Amino acid sequence: MQQLFVYHNITHLLKSTQSSIASGLFNPKFTHLSRVTTLLVEVSADPFPSCPTGNAGFKVTNFIESPLLLNSPLVDEESEQFRVAKYHHDDVFIAGYVMFYPCFSSFFQKPVFHMENFFIRECYRRKGFGKWMFSTMASKDARMGLSSIDWYASDWNESALEFYKQMGATISDDFRVLSLAGKALEALEDDDSNY
């Protein structure tokens, strides 16, 4: 997730840690939150063994059964930062991820997916991983009978916007992203004179 903030040059806004994310997503205190789905793209030069069924309530699924052949050699200069030891293999690397969850949209009168994060590491871009993640998310949306996938994108990120358009997305100029946080949120929480 930190790489997403680095890419957007907003690391000063990053407050999440591995433990705060785990606590926020899986804490019984927040049972009212919708379940977040995360597709994690892991790559290896060696075939993956069969995937275990998961633990601690996580569902683990292998989506790509056959190897993906790349047209050119891949140089991952940051590989050691993203190495994951899994299934007794130590040559597994994280290439990217997407996080999304269902929420209700009054525009469509039924639930939609909100895509929270979508990120592919630089050396894995334009190799089909992003299209695979997007297609997998869209397929899950359709199977669940949801109406759309909604998300935010930076207006300066022309390559991402072009990718989203190629995937069939439309871009709305009619809305702005607003946020109430920090001291402003606390001020309203503490001020009950408005009621």
Image (cartoon, helix red, strand yellow):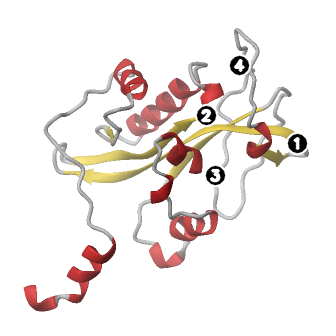
Q: Where in the figure is residue 60, as x and y percent of width and height?
A: 67, 47
Instruction: Look at mark 1 in the image and give the residue it sits on.
Output: 90
Q: Amino acid at mark 1?
A: Asp
Q: Which mark is residue 163?
A: none
Question: Which one is in front in this view, the residue at disc 1 or the one at disc 2?
Answer: 2
Q: Residue drawn at (79%, 31%), measured in percent from left and top?
A: 44
Instruction: Look at mark 4 in the image and give the residue it sits on.
Output: 68
Judge left or right: residue 60 versus residue 184: right
| Element marked by disc 3 | loop
Q: Where in the figure is residue 160, as x and y percent of width and height?
A: 42, 28
Q: Residue drawn at (48%, 28%), measured in percent from left and top?
A: 135
Q: Contact, CB < 8 Å: mark 1 with mark 4?
A: no
Question: Which one is in front in this view, the residue at disc 2 or the one at disc 3?
Answer: 2
The CA span between labels 4 and 3 is: 23 Å
Q: Residue drawn at (42%, 37%), measured in percent from left and top?
A: 143
Between 32 and 95, the one lying in front of the other is 95
Q: Amino acid at mark 4?
A: Leu
Instruction: Look at mark 2 in the image and give the residue it sits on.
Output: 121
